[in-house]
Amino acid sequence: MIGLISATSAGQRGCEHLAAAWPDEVRVYDGPVREAVGRAFAECEQLVCFLATGAVVRLIAPLLRGKDTDPGVVTVDETHQHAIALLGGHGGGANELAQRVADALGCRPVISTATDAAGVPGLDMLGWPVDGAVAAVSRAILDGDPVHLDTPHGVHPLPALPPNVTAATDSDVSLIVTDRVAAADTAARTVLLRPPSLVVGVGGSRGVPADEVLTLIGSALADAGLSPRSVAALATVDAKADEAGIVEAAERLGVPLLTYTADRLAGIDVPNPSDAPLAAVGTPSVAEAAALAAAPGGELLVPKRKSAPQEGPAMATAAVARRRPRGRLSVVGLGPGARDLLTPRAREELRRASVIVGLDQYVDQIRDLLRPGTRILESGLGAEEERARTAVEQARAGHAVALIGSGDAGVYAMASPALAEAADDIDVVGVPGVTAALAAAAILGAPLGHDHVSISLSDLHTPWDVIERRVRAAAESDLIVTFYNPRSRGRDWQLPKALSLLAEHREPGTPVGVVHAASRPDERSEVTTIAALDVTTVDMVTVVTVGNTATRNVAGRMVTPRGYRWQA
Ligand code: SAH
């Protein structure tokens, strides 16, 4: 809940505006401000105070408890010019809230937390636990000093790191991605970033206490020099899915409990099988086999060990495996060319990638956005299969790979050959991009207001008779058609042929839009007709959009009516 507090009528208008904009999220606190702030501070996760910053500082000072529990507080000045993140910038979400308030009221967000103001993520915002010299390394990152990135156990697709943190730099300030408690040469200016890389397999006899399980896990990790903060999951056999001590141990560690059938575990090769679990649950190994089952392709770091209960036989077993780094393949559409048509999400993925795969001309489009040290595997036209295979291989090796393409990377582009190669051992994310047909449509007017198709006229991958069949079908069904790959030096008869097929069902005066290099410096566009189109103006950086029988030229723009009944 976001508490809103105001004292003046301008402030009240601000409150009303936010209450209308975010109806389910806010509560307005009326009455004397001291009391209103007090109540809101106790009841809400966030506060927006339409009050002077100084006044709010005095009001909340006696209420402050700590970074982890205090709400995020934003103040807005009387003339609604500034939304100031006053307290709890990160943890309390005040920086983000200031931005939201600024968007809603049309004012400027004022952010003073160092990392956000500099536009780089704070180490505490990466999503993985950090140990070590957080303050010193944060300072270096902010100052833009080189920070050495070390990934001793493979590359685990990393969170997006600031640009000055790279493997390429040599520096005494370093960020090490490791599940080891202390890295070999832990210098004073080192931060250890904990990847979710460890899985602990556990077994236990009925009634095993959670404390015993946790003590065993703790000593197994400590003896091997491994950090509990890198434990991603506990794993066991199905028969122990409800074993209270094991369930509670997972809960207390804050990790999921993964379970596997006895059959599955019995099929896994382990160093220390034994008869006891075979008799009890039907597999010769629980701890080691479950750890390995949850870390496919990974390695066993700590073989099975047993708890040492005060009395009686051992009641718990544990083994630790390290997951093979799971690679990430993002298939990123760069848009038609203009920088502001590249989505923020695409930008983020590019910065996150440690490897970029793509055509050299597309790499040129975004080279300046990459982190220094990003490996670039560019290639010329053709070689698509090879590019796709390279991208998938790199991801399988644990890298964060961005496979890039212009427009949308799934439209006549690399997404399909890449995903045809990819198995379920890598994570795949797609980032949509503005495809040429849409970039062109926005320039032409509103040509795609009714049903439409895209057809590629390239007969490199598709036999011409298939293309022709589709053009005929589009002609007969009166679809608006956008032609990709319409004409090149060696392929010049296809476009006139396709137009003549459409002309069998459309008037010669049907509007046709030609857009060359949409959104790029040499953009050129024309609205003409099927009869008047000069195909020599069309090349491979052009799309051609042919209207349907209802499309009109209105004031030089292509307009296709939506044609619903309400318009008739
Ligand atoms: N994935 C791309 C399309 C690749 S096929 C996309 O989604 O846009 C290549 C064809 O796309 C080119 O021959 C041309 O027809 C079209 N194209 C790509 N970018 C273009 C642009 N900026 N302006 C006009 N056409 C473009």
Image (cartoon, rainbow, N blue to C red):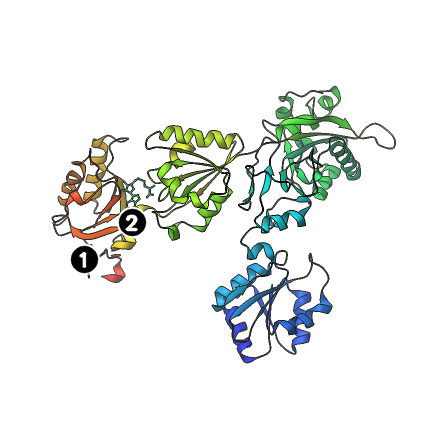
Q: Nearer the viewer, residue 367 or 526?
A: 367
Q: Position of residue 51 (x, y in %)?
A: 60, 74
Please tell me which residue lies in front, 436 or 315: 436
The image quarter in which residue 67 lies: bottom right
Residue type of the residue flagged with mark 2: Ala
Residue 432 in the image: state x and y as whole percent.
40, 45
Residue 466 locus on image (x, y percent): 23, 33
Find residue 553 and name its label: 1
Q: Nearer the viewer, residue 414 or 43?
A: 414
Q: Is residue 223 left or right of residue 506?
A: right
From the Cβ of disc 2, is ligand 1 less than 8 Å away? Answer: yes
Ligand 1: give its quadrant.
top left
Question: Which amino acid is tagged 1?
Answer: Asn
**Dot 1: within a 10 Å radius of its alpha carbon, few (fewer than 14), some, or many (20 or more) residues?**
many
**Could you give the CA–CA distance between mark 1 and mark 2, rounded to whole angstroms?**
20 Å
Q: For the residue carrying disc 2, how many other residues have a C-alpha within 10 Å: few (<14), some (14-19), or many (20+)?
A: many
Q: Quadrant of the C terminus?
A: bottom left
Q: Is residue 208 visible?
A: no
